[in-house]
C-alpha cells in the first residue's frame, strides 16, 4: 500500500512536470495557419481583394507592402509597430533613418483594416494583416504562395531608436554585417540570401545606391553609367530619384535578382556584397540557375521572419485602427 501510493504520487509528479514543460515552452502561444478559421474565415478574401486592386493600380505597391513587413518584423518583432503614427508619448518608426521618405503602402493597410473590421470587428491584428498582405503581394507579382502563420497581436508602442540605429540593415552594409544582423534576428545566412531576393521587385532612391554606382569597383561599368544618368554624384541633388532594384523585371517576382548579381549589376552596395567573392557566392549561383530552389528557400525565410517575437496570448492588443493604439 505504502509502496503503491508513493509510486502513484511519483507518477503524478511526472505528469505534472510534463504538463508544466508543455505550458512553459513557447508552444502554448505559437502562431498557426488556422488561427482565424472560426473567428474570421473571410479575412483572406478581404485582404486579397484590396491588395489586388492596389497592385492593379500600381504594381510597385506590392513591393512596398512586402518591405513594410520586413521593417516591422526587424524592429522588436512582427507586432505592427511600424504602422503606428507618432503620438505625444512616443515617436513612431516611420521617420527613422531606414524608413523616412522611403516606406510606403500604409494607405493600403488602412483600407484592408477597414474592410476586415467591418467583417469581423476586433478580431484580426494589423500585424497579421501585414503578414497576409505581403504573401498576397508576392503571389500577385508572380511569386510563390505559402500558408501564413497567424495569431500575432499588435504592439502598444513603437521604437524609433531601434529603427534608427542599424536594427534594420543599411544598404552600405558589408557581407559580415549583413550576416550578423540577420543572425541577431534568428535568421541564417541562407535566409539572408533568399530573403534578399525580395529585391527582384521594387525601387530604390538614388541616396540608397549613390555610393555603389560612383565609388565601388564591384559593379559593371556600363551599368554604373546607366544608373549615374538619373542619380547625380552630388549628395542633396536628385536624392529621391528612383531606379529599379531588378534591372529587367521590377514588377515580376523571380530569380532575376541573382542573375544581376552574377553580372555585377546589383543596385545596392549590400546587394552586390552577396556575390563578391565571399561565402554566399555559391548560394547566389544556385538561386540564379534554379528558381524553384530560390522560391522554396524564400518561403522558408518568410515564415521564419514572420515568427520573430510575436505578441500572443494576452500581450498587446487588436488595434481598431492600425495607426493608433486603442
Ligand atoms: C539584406 C538586407 C537588406 C537591405 C540592406 C535592404 C535595403 C533596401 C533599400 C536601401 C531599399 C530602397 C529604399 C529606398 O531607397 O527608398 C530597399 C527596398 C526594398 N526592400 Fe530591402 N533591404 C534588405 C532586405 C530586404 C528584405 C529581407 C526584404 C523583404 C523580405 C526586402 C524588401 C524590399 C523591397 C520589396 C523593396 C522595394 C520597396 C519599394 O519599391 O517600395 N529587403 N531595401
Ligand atoms: C525625415 O525627412 C524629412 C523630409 O526630408 C525631414 O524634414 C525630417 O527631418 C526627417 N526626419 C528625421 C527624423 O530624420
Ligand atoms: C528599443 O530598441 C532598443 C534597441 O534595439 C532596445 O534596446 C529597447 O529595449 C527597445 N525599447 C523598447 C521599449 O522596446
Ligand atoms: C564590415 O562593416 C563593419 C561595420 O561597419 C566593420 O566594423 C567591419 O570592419 C567591416 N568588415 C569588413 C570585412 O570590411
Ligand atoms: C565616395 O567616395 C568619396 C571619396 O572617398 C567620398 O567623399 C564620398 O562621400 C563617397 N560617396 C558616397 C555616396 O559614398
Image: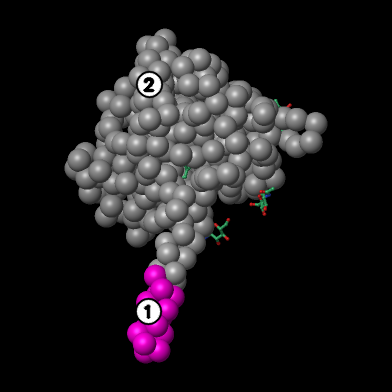
Give the residue displayed 27% in from the left and 55% down from the top.
282
Front residue (pair 181, 119): 119
- In the image, is 81 to the left or to the right of 90? left
Front residue (pair 62, 320): 320
**Residue identified by numbered label 1:** 8
Front residue (pair 97, 87): 87
- In the image, is 257 to the left or to the right of 116? left
**For the magenta stretch, what is the residue range?**
1-15
Residue 207's place in the image compared with 166, above or below, is above
**Residue identified by numbered label 2:** 42
Residue 154's place in the image compared with 56, above or below, is below
Instruction: Check disc 2: other Cα within 10 Å, few if <14, some if 14-19, many if 20+.
Output: some
Indicate whether residue 222 is drawn in magenta.
no
Q: In the rendering, at what x and y percent does residue 292 appear? A: 20, 40
SS label for mark 1: helix
Does any portion of residue 197 appear in the rendered image?
A: no
Q: Are marks 1 and 2 in contact (CB under 8 Å)?
A: no
Instruction: Check disc 1: other Cα within 10 Å, few if <14, some if 14-19, many if 20+.
Output: few
SS label for mark 2: loop
Give the residue displayed 44% in from the left and 69% down from the top.
16
Amino acid at each position: 500500500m505504502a509502496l503503491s501510493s508513493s509510486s502513484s504520487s511519483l507518477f503524478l509528479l511526472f505528469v505534472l512536470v510534463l504538463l508544466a514543460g508543455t505550458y512553459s515552452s513557447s508552444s502554448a502561444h505559437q502562431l498557426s495557419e488556422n488561427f482565424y478559421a472560426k473567428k474570421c474565415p473571410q479575412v483572406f478574401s478581404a485582404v486579397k481583394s484590396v491588395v489586388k486592386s492596389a497592385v492593379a493600380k500600381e504594381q510597385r505597391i506590392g513591393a512596398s507592402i512586402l518591405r513594410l513587413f520586413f521593417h516591422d518584423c526587424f524592429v522588436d518583432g512582427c507586432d505592427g509597430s511600424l504602422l503606428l503614427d507618432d503620438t505625444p508619448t512616443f515617436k513612431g518608426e516611420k521617420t527613422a533613418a531606414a524608413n523616412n521618405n522611403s516606406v510606403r503602402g500604409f494607405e493600403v493597410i488602412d483600407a484592408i483594416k477597414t474592410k476586415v473590421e467591418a467583417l469581423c470587428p476586433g478580431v484580426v491584428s494589423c500585424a497579421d494583416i501585414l503578414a497576409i498582405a505581403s504573401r498576397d503581394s508576392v503571389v500577385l507579382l508572380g511569386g510563390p504562395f505559402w500558408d501564413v502563420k497567424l495569431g500575432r497581436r499588435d504592439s502598444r508602442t513603437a521604437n524609433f531608436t531601434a529603427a534608427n540605429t542599424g536594427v534594420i540593415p543599411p544598404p552600405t552594409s558589408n557581407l559580415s554585417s549583413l550576416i550578423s544582423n540577420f543572425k541577431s534576428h534568428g535568421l541564417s545566412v541562407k535566409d539572408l540570401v533568399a530573403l534578399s531576393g525580395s529585391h527582384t521587385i521594387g525601387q530604390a532612391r538614388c541616396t540608397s545606391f549613390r555610393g555603389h554606382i560612383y565609388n565601388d569597383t564591384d559593379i559593371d561599368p556600363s551599368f554604373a553609367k546607366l544608373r549615374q544618368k538619373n542619380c547625380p554624384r552630388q549628395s542633396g541633388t536628385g536624392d529621391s530619384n528612383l531606379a529599379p532594384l531588378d534591372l529587367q523585371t521590377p514588377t515580376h517576382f523571380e530569380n532575376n535578382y541573382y542573375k544581376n548579381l552574377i553580372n555585377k549589376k546589383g543596385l545596392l552596395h549590400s546587394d552586390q556584397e552577396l556575390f563578391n567573392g565571399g561565402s554566399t557566392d555559391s548560394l547566389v549561383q544556385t538561386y540564379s540557375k534554379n528558381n524553384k530552389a530560390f522560391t522554396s528557400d524564400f518561403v522558408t525565410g518568410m515564415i521564419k521572419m514572420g515568427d520573430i517575437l510575436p505578441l500572443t496570448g494576452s500581450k498587446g492588443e487588436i488595434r481598431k485602427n492600425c495607426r493608433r493604439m486603442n
